[in-house]
Image (tube, rainbow, N blue to C red):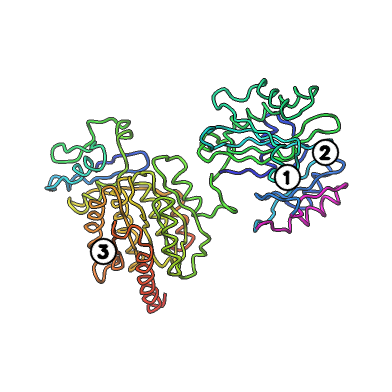
Amino acid sequence: MAKFLEYQGKEWLRKAGMPVPKGKVASSPEEAKEVAEWIGGPVAVKGQVQAGGRGKAGIVKLVNTPEEAAAAAAEILSKTVKGLPVRQVLIEEKLDIKKEYYCSFVINNAREARSPMLMFSTEGGMDIESVPEELIFKLNIDPIFGFKTYDAIDFCVKAGIPDDELSKFASFLTKLAKIYKEYDCQTLEINPFVMTGNGDLVCADCKMEIDNSAVGRHPEFGIKIARDLPGEPTELDLIGWSIEETDARGTGFLMNMGYDEVSPGYIGYHPIGGGSAMMGLDALNQVGLKPANYADTSGNPVGSKIYRVAKCVLSQPNIDGYLLGGFMMANQEQWHHANALVKVLWEELPKKPGLPCVLLLCGNKEDESLEILRKGLADLMTPDGPGKRIEIYGKEYVTDTKFIGERLAALAKEYRAEKEAHGK
Amino acid sequence: MLEIKERSIIIRIDTSKCEACETKACAAACKKFARGYLQIVDGKPSVEHLTPEEVLRLGTECLACEIACKFEGNKALEIEVPIKGLDEYLAKRGLA
């Protein structure tokens, strides 16, 4: 999912007409001080990272003066939370909180629902997991008719909202439901939204996640990559996203796995399908090899997508091998993989002569696919050719992770020795 | 030179090599692996019977015609498959 930081989500809520605290994001203590002066009065300084439990991590602080805001920002910006460095802080007016509430809109994947679901509790401001089940109210929302005012009033009555505040809460929740739909959110959680001393409802926090598949409909969000990543996207991640961004013809997924591009023992990894990918990782783990990247060309992708993924996988510097891991009897016609692989290996192996390439391709059109590989790669696979370490396997080895891993390890060992002998 | 633009690739065929080709493997591959829009006219591959829009609609970017031509035909056909950002990625690493 494309996840917004709190300040970004709140900005989109504000643009949609929802009440959010006055505030701005800052990247330095000096900026934090300026924002606090602009707000005037006590402020909250909140570290902006994609991680929960920010209060417990000490990156949310309440202060009274701009100088204190600068000091709090300096402290928070020096921290790392769950491996993520804090690079920005949100400076917001301190709210006069009378009561905190919880609400979220999520996708309910249960068979009887398969719809958006509203979760609400009068116990906001804490982890929803720690709120007793009987205090959490849930409602599946009809995806066609939406969440109407009468639904909201009925729901709020059941949740124990007093009669004189029903209209206010119903209006707040129906607006959020509309935003959830219009922004194509996967998750929209406001924890807490608060009632101020004046009786106003305000979104005090915001967790907004956009459906990856809908990002193309929202250029206004400026999301450069719709992927779940632990931090900033790498160049390989961005290239991988460009393969998928506007091409829905099957999956052509590619992402970095933290490879430093110099360490030995890393394999350009090209699995076909998620479960198959797990088996391929078993194959690598069993022999002490590691994946340089993650990939997936399943769902019957077109040849050009398979080519792009394979080309990028093989373009990674200093890999010790390439594994096409088709550890399943695929329904997709595998000959598109075969054609794409022949094209890629003819282009890439002359640049990386002798690179071990273990190709496991099983399933629909397997015989024809293996024939395309054998015939197309024969001139590379000569004893002194750049493809001398290509090995091609089919259904006899479809679940044999041990054998495939051991073949790759043996070939990689030879390859490294050969490179070292040549002083590379 | 025949240039065919599919959705995200460009197929270039040096048709001067095609008359001498005995297999016409490209058209056979197009029929087997895709929708068979590549036809042989006067001994050469052609898409003249289609509009550019029809080529876009029918093209499946299977790459099979290039492989067929390379190994069974006259090595007359190449497909350009651009990858956004890859050249810069390689250049930064001295691999361009």
Residue, far top: A150
Q: Earlier in the sequence, mark 3 or mark 1?
A: 1
The residue indicated by pointer 2 is A95
User: Magenta stretch: residue A75 in it?
Assistant: yes
Mark number displayed over residue A25: 1
Q: CA distance from mark 2 to mark 1?
A: 17 Å
Q: CA distance from mark 3 to mark 1?
A: 56 Å
Question: Subunit of mark 2?
Answer: A
Q: Amino acid at mark 1?
A: Val
Circle 2 or circle 3, nearest the eye: 2
Disc 2 to disc 3, C-alpha distance? 70 Å
Which residue shows up at 82% across the image and 55% down it? Answer: A71
Q: Which residues are magenta?
A: A57-82
Circle 3 marks a residue in which chain?
A
- In the structure shown, which secondary structural element does the residue marked by tag 3 occupy? loop
Q: Nearer the viewer, mark 2 or mark 1?
A: 2
Sequence order check: which comes first, mark 2 or mark 3? 2
Which residue is tagged 3? A380
